[in-house]
Image: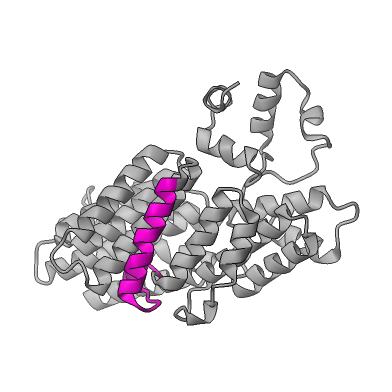
Amino acid sequence: MSQDALAGLIGMSRSWLSQVERGIRGVDRLSTLNDLATVLRIDVTDLIGRDWVLAPDAPEHVKAVDAVRSQLASYHHLLGEPAAPWPLPQLRNGAVQVHQAYQAAKYHTATAMLPDLIRAADAYDGYQGRDGRETHLARCSVYSAAAKLLTKVGEHQLGWLAADRATHAAMAAESKAAQGLAAYQVVCALLRSERTDDAERIAVRSAEGLMSLTGSDAPDAVSLAGSLWLISSVIAARRSDRATATDRLTTAGQLGDLLAHDGNHWWTAFGPTNVLIHRASVAAEFGEPSNVLRVATEIDLDTMPAGLQGRRSRLHIDLAWAQTQAKNDMEAILHLQAAERVAPESIKYHTIARELVRELLRRSRKPSPSLTAIATRAGVLA
Protein backbone atom coordinates (compact mmCIF):
# COMPACT_ATOMS: atom_id res chain seq x y z
CA MET A 1 0.00 0.00 0.00
CA SER A 2 1.37 3.43 -0.90
CA GLN A 3 1.98 6.12 1.72
CA ASP A 4 -0.75 8.28 0.16
CA ALA A 5 -3.27 5.41 0.29
CA LEU A 6 -2.55 4.39 3.88
CA ALA A 7 -2.39 7.98 5.12
CA GLY A 8 -5.70 8.75 3.43
CA LEU A 9 -7.43 5.72 4.92
CA ILE A 10 -6.51 6.76 8.47
CA GLY A 11 -7.13 10.46 7.92
CA MET A 12 -3.54 11.60 8.31
CA SER A 13 -1.11 13.32 5.95
CA ARG A 14 1.58 11.66 3.91
CA SER A 15 4.24 13.74 5.68
CA TRP A 16 3.01 12.46 9.06
CA LEU A 17 3.15 8.85 7.88
CA SER A 18 6.62 9.41 6.40
CA GLN A 19 7.86 10.64 9.80
CA VAL A 20 6.41 7.54 11.47
CA GLU A 21 8.12 5.24 8.98
CA ARG A 22 11.47 6.99 9.50
CA GLY A 23 11.21 6.72 13.26
CA ILE A 24 10.92 10.48 13.78
CA ARG A 25 7.61 10.19 15.57
CA GLY A 26 5.52 7.45 17.12
CA VAL A 27 1.81 6.66 17.05
CA ASP A 28 0.37 6.87 20.54
CA ARG A 29 -3.02 8.44 19.87
CA LEU A 30 -5.56 5.69 20.54
CA SER A 31 -7.95 6.73 17.76
CA THR A 32 -5.16 6.64 15.18
CA LEU A 33 -3.96 3.26 16.44
CA ASN A 34 -7.51 1.93 16.12
CA ASP A 35 -7.75 3.24 12.56
CA LEU A 36 -4.40 1.68 11.64
CA ALA A 37 -5.38 -1.65 13.18
CA THR A 38 -8.67 -1.64 11.26
CA VAL A 39 -6.97 -0.90 7.92
CA LEU A 40 -4.25 -3.52 8.55
CA ARG A 41 -6.83 -6.02 9.90
CA ILE A 42 -5.06 -6.74 13.18
CA ASP A 43 -5.73 -6.09 16.85
CA VAL A 44 -4.36 -2.86 18.41
CA THR A 45 -2.49 -4.87 21.04
CA ASP A 46 -0.77 -6.89 18.29
CA LEU A 47 -0.01 -3.70 16.39
CA ILE A 48 1.85 -2.00 19.27
CA GLY A 49 3.01 -5.13 21.09
CA ARG A 50 1.92 -3.93 24.53
CA ASP A 51 -1.07 -2.94 26.61
CA TRP A 52 -2.30 0.64 26.55
CA VAL A 53 -0.63 2.14 29.62
CA LEU A 54 0.44 5.64 28.63
CA ALA A 55 -1.43 8.87 29.03
CA PRO A 56 -3.33 10.34 26.04
CA ASP A 57 -1.19 12.02 23.40
CA ALA A 58 -2.05 15.61 24.29
CA PRO A 59 -0.15 18.18 26.33
CA GLU A 60 -1.49 19.50 29.60
CA HIS A 61 -4.24 22.00 29.03
CA VAL A 62 -3.18 25.58 29.59
CA LYS A 63 -5.99 27.11 31.64
CA ALA A 64 -5.54 30.55 30.14
CA VAL A 65 -6.32 29.19 26.67
CA ASP A 66 -10.05 29.18 27.50
CA ALA A 67 -9.87 32.88 28.27
CA VAL A 68 -7.93 33.52 25.05
CA ARG A 69 -10.51 31.56 23.06
CA SER A 70 -13.32 33.59 24.61
CA GLN A 71 -11.55 36.85 23.83
CA LEU A 72 -10.83 35.92 20.20
CA ALA A 73 -14.48 34.92 19.75
CA SER A 74 -16.03 37.89 21.56
CA TYR A 75 -15.68 40.55 18.81
CA HIS A 76 -16.47 43.24 21.39
CA HIS A 77 -15.14 45.89 19.02
CA LEU A 78 -17.68 44.90 16.34
CA LEU A 79 -20.62 44.77 18.75
CA GLY A 80 -20.19 48.27 20.09
CA GLU A 81 -18.56 47.00 23.30
CA PRO A 82 -14.92 48.06 22.84
CA ALA A 83 -12.57 48.21 25.77
CA ALA A 84 -10.93 51.48 26.69
CA PRO A 85 -7.87 51.64 24.42
CA TRP A 86 -4.52 51.28 26.11
CA PRO A 87 -1.96 54.03 25.54
CA LEU A 88 0.31 53.03 22.67
CA PRO A 89 3.44 52.66 24.86
CA GLN A 90 1.53 50.27 27.15
CA LEU A 91 0.36 48.18 24.18
CA ARG A 92 3.90 48.03 22.80
CA ASN A 93 5.31 47.06 26.17
CA GLY A 94 2.72 44.33 26.59
CA ALA A 95 3.67 42.89 23.19
CA VAL A 96 7.35 42.92 24.15
CA GLN A 97 6.68 41.14 27.44
CA VAL A 98 4.63 38.35 25.89
CA HIS A 99 7.23 37.75 23.15
CA GLN A 100 9.98 37.62 25.74
CA ALA A 101 8.04 35.14 27.87
CA TYR A 102 7.43 32.96 24.83
CA GLN A 103 11.07 32.92 23.78
CA ALA A 104 12.03 32.06 27.35
CA ALA A 105 9.64 29.08 27.01
CA LYS A 106 7.46 30.37 29.84
CA TYR A 107 4.30 29.36 28.04
CA HIS A 108 1.90 29.46 30.99
CA THR A 109 3.03 32.95 31.94
CA ALA A 110 2.88 34.22 28.38
CA THR A 111 -0.55 32.77 27.65
CA ALA A 112 -1.97 34.32 30.82
CA MET A 113 -1.04 37.76 29.43
CA LEU A 114 -2.95 37.27 26.19
CA PRO A 115 -6.66 37.91 26.95
CA ASP A 116 -6.15 41.51 28.11
CA LEU A 117 -3.58 42.18 25.38
CA ILE A 118 -5.84 40.86 22.63
CA ARG A 119 -8.77 42.94 23.84
CA ALA A 120 -6.54 46.02 23.91
CA ALA A 121 -5.34 45.29 20.36
CA ASP A 122 -8.92 44.67 19.18
CA ALA A 123 -9.94 48.09 20.50
CA TYR A 124 -7.74 49.70 17.85
CA ASP A 125 -9.23 47.74 14.92
CA GLY A 126 -9.71 50.16 12.02
CA TYR A 127 -7.88 52.94 13.89
CA GLN A 128 -6.82 55.81 11.61
CA GLY A 129 -5.82 58.45 14.09
CA ARG A 130 -2.50 59.79 15.23
CA ASP A 131 0.32 57.23 15.30
CA GLY A 132 -1.89 54.89 13.28
CA ARG A 133 1.01 53.01 11.68
CA GLU A 134 2.77 52.44 15.00
CA THR A 135 -0.49 51.36 16.60
CA HIS A 136 -1.12 48.71 13.95
CA LEU A 137 2.47 47.51 14.22
CA ALA A 138 1.90 46.99 17.94
CA ARG A 139 -1.36 45.13 17.18
CA CYS A 140 0.47 42.92 14.70
CA SER A 141 3.06 42.11 17.34
CA VAL A 142 0.37 41.18 19.88
CA TYR A 143 -1.50 38.91 17.46
CA SER A 144 1.75 37.30 16.26
CA ALA A 145 2.71 36.47 19.83
CA ALA A 146 -0.75 35.03 20.40
CA ALA A 147 -0.46 32.91 17.25
CA LYS A 148 2.89 31.41 18.18
CA LEU A 149 1.78 30.64 21.74
CA LEU A 150 -1.50 29.05 20.72
CA THR A 151 0.21 26.95 18.07
CA LYS A 152 2.83 25.84 20.59
CA VAL A 153 0.29 24.59 23.12
CA GLY A 154 -1.63 22.64 20.46
CA GLU A 155 -4.39 25.14 19.67
CA HIS A 156 -3.39 25.51 16.03
CA GLN A 157 -6.85 26.56 14.80
CA LEU A 158 -6.88 29.43 17.29
CA GLY A 159 -3.29 30.12 16.28
CA TRP A 160 -4.37 30.38 12.68
CA LEU A 161 -7.09 32.87 13.66
CA ALA A 162 -4.61 35.00 15.61
CA ALA A 163 -2.11 34.86 12.73
CA ASP A 164 -4.82 36.04 10.34
CA ARG A 165 -5.49 39.04 12.58
CA ALA A 166 -1.76 39.74 12.62
CA THR A 167 -1.82 39.77 8.83
CA HIS A 168 -4.64 42.33 8.73
CA ALA A 169 -2.86 44.53 11.26
CA ALA A 170 0.36 44.32 9.21
CA MET A 171 -1.53 45.35 6.07
CA ALA A 172 -3.09 48.28 7.95
CA ALA A 173 0.41 49.36 9.03
CA GLU A 174 1.62 49.10 5.40
CA SER A 175 4.76 47.38 6.68
CA LYS A 176 6.46 44.63 4.65
CA ALA A 177 8.43 43.58 7.71
CA ALA A 178 5.27 43.18 9.77
CA GLN A 179 3.72 41.23 6.91
CA GLY A 180 6.73 38.91 6.98
CA LEU A 181 6.30 38.41 10.74
CA ALA A 182 2.61 37.61 10.29
CA ALA A 183 3.32 35.31 7.35
CA TYR A 184 5.69 33.23 9.48
CA GLN A 185 2.97 32.67 12.07
CA VAL A 186 0.44 31.75 9.36
CA VAL A 187 2.95 29.19 8.07
CA CYS A 188 3.41 27.67 11.54
CA ALA A 189 -0.33 27.40 12.13
CA LEU A 190 -0.94 25.87 8.69
CA LEU A 191 1.88 23.40 9.22
CA ARG A 192 0.42 22.22 12.53
CA SER A 193 -2.97 21.92 10.79
CA GLU A 194 -1.42 19.55 8.21
CA ARG A 195 -1.87 22.18 5.45
CA THR A 196 1.69 21.56 4.30
CA ASP A 197 1.33 22.73 0.70
CA ASP A 198 -0.29 26.02 1.72
CA ALA A 199 2.33 26.56 4.42
CA GLU A 200 5.18 25.97 1.98
CA ARG A 201 3.73 28.27 -0.67
CA ILE A 202 3.28 31.15 1.76
CA ALA A 203 6.73 30.67 3.31
CA VAL A 204 8.56 30.65 -0.02
CA ARG A 205 6.65 33.53 -1.60
CA SER A 206 6.97 35.68 1.52
CA ALA A 207 10.72 35.01 1.71
CA GLU A 208 11.17 35.83 -1.96
CA GLY A 209 9.11 39.01 -1.55
CA LEU A 210 11.26 40.22 1.33
CA MET A 211 14.46 39.53 -0.61
CA SER A 212 13.20 41.52 -3.60
CA LEU A 213 12.53 44.69 -1.60
CA THR A 214 14.68 47.79 -1.70
CA GLY A 215 16.79 47.57 1.44
CA SER A 216 16.54 43.79 1.53
CA ASP A 217 20.00 43.71 3.12
CA ALA A 218 18.71 45.49 6.23
CA PRO A 219 18.79 43.35 9.41
CA ASP A 220 14.99 43.21 9.70
CA ALA A 221 14.43 41.98 6.13
CA VAL A 222 17.38 39.58 6.30
CA SER A 223 16.17 38.06 9.57
CA LEU A 224 12.55 37.66 8.47
CA ALA A 225 13.48 36.21 5.06
CA GLY A 226 16.04 33.92 6.67
CA SER A 227 13.48 32.58 9.16
CA LEU A 228 11.01 31.88 6.36
CA TRP A 229 13.68 30.01 4.37
CA LEU A 230 14.50 27.97 7.46
CA ILE A 231 10.93 26.85 8.06
CA SER A 232 10.47 26.15 4.34
CA SER A 233 13.56 23.91 4.47
CA VAL A 234 11.94 21.89 7.27
CA ILE A 235 8.77 21.60 5.18
CA ALA A 236 10.78 20.32 2.20
CA ALA A 237 12.45 17.76 4.46
CA ARG A 238 9.05 16.53 5.60
CA ARG A 239 8.26 15.95 1.93
CA SER A 240 11.54 13.99 1.68
CA ASP A 241 12.80 16.54 -0.89
CA ARG A 242 16.49 16.63 -0.04
CA ALA A 243 17.61 18.89 -2.88
CA THR A 244 15.07 21.61 -2.08
CA ALA A 245 15.69 21.42 1.66
CA THR A 246 19.43 21.77 1.07
CA ASP A 247 19.00 24.73 -1.29
CA ARG A 248 16.81 26.56 1.20
CA LEU A 249 19.22 25.92 4.04
CA THR A 250 22.01 27.29 1.85
CA THR A 251 20.01 30.44 1.13
CA ALA A 252 19.28 30.88 4.84
CA GLY A 253 22.97 30.33 5.58
CA GLN A 254 23.93 33.08 3.15
CA LEU A 255 21.50 35.43 4.86
CA GLY A 256 22.94 34.43 8.22
CA ASP A 257 26.41 35.27 6.96
CA LEU A 258 25.08 38.59 5.66
CA LEU A 259 23.63 39.41 9.08
CA ALA A 260 26.96 38.28 10.58
CA HIS A 261 25.66 37.90 14.13
CA ASP A 262 23.07 36.01 16.13
CA GLY A 263 20.25 38.48 16.43
CA ASN A 264 16.59 38.61 17.36
CA HIS A 265 15.21 41.16 14.93
CA TRP A 266 11.41 41.05 14.85
CA TRP A 267 11.54 38.19 17.35
CA THR A 268 13.02 35.83 14.75
CA ALA A 269 16.04 34.56 16.75
CA PHE A 270 17.71 34.46 13.33
CA GLY A 271 21.45 34.26 12.83
CA PRO A 272 24.22 31.79 11.93
CA THR A 273 23.62 29.66 15.04
CA ASN A 274 19.90 29.32 14.36
CA VAL A 275 20.75 28.21 10.82
CA LEU A 276 22.92 25.44 12.26
CA ILE A 277 20.17 24.41 14.69
CA HIS A 278 17.81 24.09 11.72
CA ARG A 279 20.41 22.03 9.86
CA ALA A 280 20.24 19.60 12.76
CA SER A 281 16.44 19.69 12.69
CA VAL A 282 16.36 18.99 8.95
CA ALA A 283 18.75 16.07 9.44
CA ALA A 284 16.33 14.75 12.07
CA GLU A 285 13.43 15.13 9.63
CA PHE A 286 15.38 12.96 7.18
CA GLY A 287 15.97 10.38 9.91
CA GLU A 288 19.76 10.88 10.02
CA PRO A 289 20.94 10.77 13.65
CA SER A 290 24.64 10.76 12.73
CA ASN A 291 24.23 14.05 10.84
CA VAL A 292 22.36 15.58 13.76
CA LEU A 293 25.25 14.71 16.05
CA ARG A 294 27.80 15.98 13.52
CA VAL A 295 26.08 19.36 13.05
CA ALA A 296 25.78 19.75 16.81
CA THR A 297 29.56 19.81 17.15
CA GLU A 298 29.57 23.09 15.20
CA ILE A 299 27.02 24.85 17.42
CA ASP A 300 27.84 27.20 20.27
CA LEU A 301 24.59 28.12 21.99
CA ASP A 302 26.35 30.79 24.06
CA THR A 303 26.55 33.03 20.99
CA MET A 304 22.76 33.42 20.88
CA PRO A 305 21.11 36.43 22.55
CA ALA A 306 19.96 36.00 26.13
CA GLY A 307 16.39 34.85 26.61
CA LEU A 308 16.14 32.46 23.66
CA GLN A 309 15.64 29.45 25.90
CA GLY A 310 13.10 27.77 23.68
CA ARG A 311 15.50 27.81 20.74
CA ARG A 312 18.33 26.46 22.91
CA SER A 313 16.16 23.62 24.20
CA ARG A 314 15.27 22.61 20.64
CA LEU A 315 18.86 21.55 19.95
CA HIS A 316 18.88 19.31 23.02
CA ILE A 317 15.60 17.73 21.86
CA ASP A 318 17.10 17.00 18.43
CA LEU A 319 20.15 15.49 20.12
CA ALA A 320 17.91 13.40 22.37
CA TRP A 321 16.18 12.08 19.23
CA ALA A 322 19.54 11.26 17.61
CA GLN A 323 20.78 9.40 20.69
CA THR A 324 17.47 7.53 20.94
CA GLN A 325 17.84 6.38 17.35
CA ALA A 326 21.40 5.25 18.11
CA LYS A 327 20.08 3.27 21.12
CA ASN A 328 22.11 5.46 23.48
CA ASP A 329 19.25 5.82 25.92
CA MET A 330 21.21 7.30 28.81
CA GLU A 331 22.63 10.05 26.56
CA ALA A 332 19.12 10.72 25.27
CA ILE A 333 17.83 11.13 28.82
CA LEU A 334 20.69 13.50 29.62
CA HIS A 335 19.74 15.69 26.65
CA LEU A 336 16.09 15.69 27.70
CA GLN A 337 17.21 16.77 31.16
CA ALA A 338 19.32 19.50 29.58
CA ALA A 339 16.33 20.68 27.54
CA GLU A 340 14.30 20.89 30.74
CA ARG A 341 17.04 22.77 32.58
CA VAL A 342 17.21 25.32 29.80
CA ALA A 343 13.43 25.60 29.41
CA PRO A 344 11.36 23.66 31.97
CA GLU A 345 8.14 23.75 29.90
CA SER A 346 9.79 22.78 26.61
CA ILE A 347 9.21 19.00 26.65
CA LYS A 348 5.60 19.25 27.80
CA TYR A 349 4.65 21.21 24.68
CA HIS A 350 6.95 19.61 22.11
CA THR A 351 5.35 16.70 20.24
CA ILE A 352 8.58 14.94 19.25
CA ALA A 353 10.04 15.29 22.75
CA ARG A 354 6.98 13.65 24.29
CA GLU A 355 7.18 10.82 21.78
CA LEU A 356 10.86 10.33 22.61
CA VAL A 357 9.94 9.93 26.26
CA ARG A 358 7.33 7.35 25.29
CA GLU A 359 9.85 5.44 23.20
CA LEU A 360 12.40 5.42 26.01
CA LEU A 361 9.75 4.17 28.44
CA ARG A 362 8.65 1.44 26.05
CA ARG A 363 12.06 -0.12 25.71
CA SER A 364 13.11 0.23 29.34
CA ARG A 365 12.57 -2.92 31.37
CA LYS A 366 12.75 -0.83 34.48
CA PRO A 367 12.67 2.93 33.74
CA SER A 368 15.23 4.92 35.68
CA PRO A 369 13.99 7.43 38.27
CA SER A 370 15.25 10.27 36.05
CA LEU A 371 13.25 9.05 33.03
CA THR A 372 10.16 8.47 35.14
CA ALA A 373 10.45 11.98 36.54
CA ILE A 374 10.75 13.50 33.05
CA ALA A 375 7.77 11.46 31.83
CA THR A 376 5.67 12.59 34.77
CA ARG A 377 6.53 16.27 34.35
CA ALA A 378 5.85 16.05 30.61
CA GLY A 379 2.44 14.50 31.21
CA VAL A 380 3.38 11.28 29.38
CA LEU A 381 2.74 9.11 32.41
CA ALA A 382 -0.73 9.42 33.85
Q: In this view, does 5 lie above or below 259?
A: above
* Residue 109 magenta: no
Question: Which residue is most to the front?
Answer: 243
Left or right for 152, reference 196? right
The image's colouring method is one colour
Asked whether residue 309 appears in the rendered view, the answer is yes
Question: Which residue is most to the top?
Answer: 41
Identified at 31% across, 43% down, the residue is 201
Identified at 57% across, 37% down, the residue is 18
Q: Where is residue 357 in the image (x, y as percent from the top left)?
A: 72, 55
Q: Which of 367 and 17 is in front in this view?
A: 17
Q: In this view, does 250 lie above or below 362?
A: below
Q: Position of residue 57 (x, y in %)?
A: 65, 44
Q: In this view, does 131 lie above or below 159?
A: below
Q: How many marks?
A: 0
Left or right for 48, reference 110? right
Identified at 55% across, 54% down, the residue is 283
Q: Which of 212 and 83 is in front in this view?
A: 212
Q: Position of residue 265 (x, y in %)?
A: 32, 73
Q: In which quarter of the image is residue 314?
A: bottom right
- The secondary structure that dominates the magenta segment is helix
* Residue 248 magenta: yes
Identified at 45% across, 42% down, the residue is 241
Q: Which of 143 and 236 is in front in this view?
A: 236
The region drawn magenta spans 243-269
Q: Where is residue 231 in the image (x, y as percent from the top left)?
A: 41, 54
Q: Nearer the viewer, residue 360 or 61?
A: 360
Q: Quadrant of residue 348?
A: bottom right
The quadrant of the picture occupied by the N terminus is top right
Question: Which residue is most to the left?
Answer: 129
